[in-house]
Every structure is written in structure tokens, then in C-alpha cells.
Image (tube, helix red, strand yellow):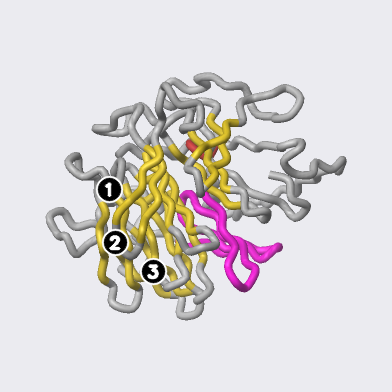
Amino acid sequence: MKHHLSNFIFLVMVLLAGECPVLSQRVTFNSVPPPEIDPWSIVISITQDSQGYMWFAGNGIHRYDGMHVVTYRNDPLNPNSLAANAVETLFADDNNLIWIGTQGAGMDCFNTVKKTFTHYPHQQGNENSISGGTIAAITKDREGNIWIGTGEGLDRLDPKTGKFVHYRYNAGDSTSLSNDMIRAIFVDRQDVVWVGTGSPFHNDAEINNKAGGLNKLDKKTNKFTRYLHNDNDPYSLIDNRVRAIYEDSHGTFWVGTAGDGLHSLDRVTGKFKRYPYDPVKLSRSPLGTTFTWVDDHITFIREDAVGSL
């Protein structure tokens, strides 16, 4: 899978009048300056740990305390350093651990107390290693399992044993993962694991550009329920390439895809409600092919303190 250091550009921010309050408020942005020595060039992922520190990814990882930045990068002479400087995603859990998905070097776990890195590299032919070298999504469930989205399938890691369980697409099994290109993972309030698959990037190797789908995992059976686009069903996904999944404070379950694809999902009926661009109700950037190597898509959905999305 090609590296996509520019995919942070695609930030689609939505305000839903009628679905959540939209307040007349002035939004102020404060610049966070990069380190003067060897500054970062991009910020591709952000997370906040249990101590309140902000962590930025891209050209290494950077901890920000509101005033100062501490940077961690790969040192070829130090095996305890970050595995690679090209970082795709970050996830901070509540055990003083920062989980780091790299582009090509697998996953790292940084212990913020001991200041040590644990490496989980992809090893070709080794089923006991992580499925792929590039990691696009990481999250954690209530049982403490770490869920990892790679370009070669979904993995579940038990941090206590260090062992992986792999979930992959099987053409002969409709209850398997719908696609091995994982772009989003979300654990809802019922501890159900949802997986968004498919890639809007045209230069991803061996990728069917319209394949993908939303998947719900039954942990008891390890089987998936697939949610896919259907040309004849207006209550299906607009597009199979799922990049954003989110459950808001009201319990509404949101899914973002390529192709003007903002949806809410009724998890009882399995039906989607589509929210296409509306100049009055829904603001968004123009739909179009801004870059030739990627289709327009929603990269994240989040809720702020006053309930706006």
C-alpha cells in the first residue's frame, strides 16, 4: 500500500441543523508552533492521553503539554526508538500507553512512564505477527483487546500475551470481513466492534476502487454482518468505501464514506439514512476530485462540547 502523507488534507467538518444544536459562537484557533530544531512537516493524526497531553503524529510523534513539545523519532542505532517516522495513526489508552500505527513498519506501543517502545512488525509468512506493515486504525474494547486495522485485514491483539487473532476476507464466506483494506474501527457503547473497509486512494496496490463495506463483528461467533451499497436500495450505503464511524452522545450512529456519504444507521433495522449536501442544513467542502489520486470522502466525524458534529 502506498504511503498517503497528504490524506490529512481531507477534513470534512459537518454541522447538522435540526439533528444537533448549532450555536452562534466565535471559534478561535491558536497556532501550535513545531519545534525549532527539526520541526514536523505535517500532522496526520491527533490523540489525547489520560494525563491530558496531546500527541501529534507525522514525521515522528510529538507530545504537547500546552507550552512545550517533546519529539520521539526513529534512531537507526537505537532499537528502543520509534520503528519508523512515517506514522499513520495514534491511539492513547488508559494504561499510559500510546499505540502507534506506522506506514510500513507495523505497530509500536509507547509506554509513557518507562519511555520504552514495544515493536509489533509485520513478518512475511509469520501468522503470529501483525497482518500488515501499514496500520490505518487502532482502538481498544472493554476487555482490553487492541483492534488494529491494516491493509491486509483486521487484527485483535491481547496485550497480556502478545498474541494476534486475524480476521480476513473470504470469498466463499458471507460472514467474513467484506474487505481486507481496513480504514476505520469503532467500539460502540455496547462493546460491539464496527469495521470500515475499502480505500478511496486510486494508487493503493491491488485495490478494487469500489470495494469495501461496513462490518459488525459478533465476538461470540467471530462472524461479521456486512452492510454494503445496493443500487436498488435507498436505505443502503451511498458508497462502500467507509472511512469514518462515530456514535454521538444521543446514541446516533454515524457512518462516513466516499461520494457525499454522510449517513446515520438504525442498528435495529439495519437501514441507513442519507444526509447529502444541503446549502441550508449541511455545510461541507465542495464535492469533487481535488486530487487525481483520491476520491472525495469523509475522514472523521466528531462531536464537540455543545453537541455539534
Given the current orientation, which residue lies at the most extreme front position?
A: 269
Q: Secondary structure at mark 1?
A: loop
How far apart marks 3 and 1 lie (CA) works out to 21 Å
- Mark 1 or mark 2, which has the lower sequence index? 1
Per the rendered image, the range of residues in magenta is 44-72
Badge 3 crowding class, 10 Å Cα cut-off, few under 14, some 14 to 19, many 20 or more, is some
Q: Which residue is mark 3?
A: 145
* Percent x, y of residue 14: 67, 36
| Residues marked 3 and 2 touching at CB (< 8 Å) | no
The answer to whether residue 258 is above or below residue 167 is above
Q: CA distance from mark 3 to mark 2?
A: 16 Å
Q: Nearer the viewer, residue 131 or 173?
A: 173
Which residue type carries mark 3?
Answer: Asn
Asked if disc 1 and disc 2 are in contact, CB closer than 8 Å, the reply is: yes
Which quadrant of the rendered structure holds the C terminus?
top right
Look at mark 1 in the image and give the residue it sits on: 175
Q: Give amino acid for label 2.
A: Thr
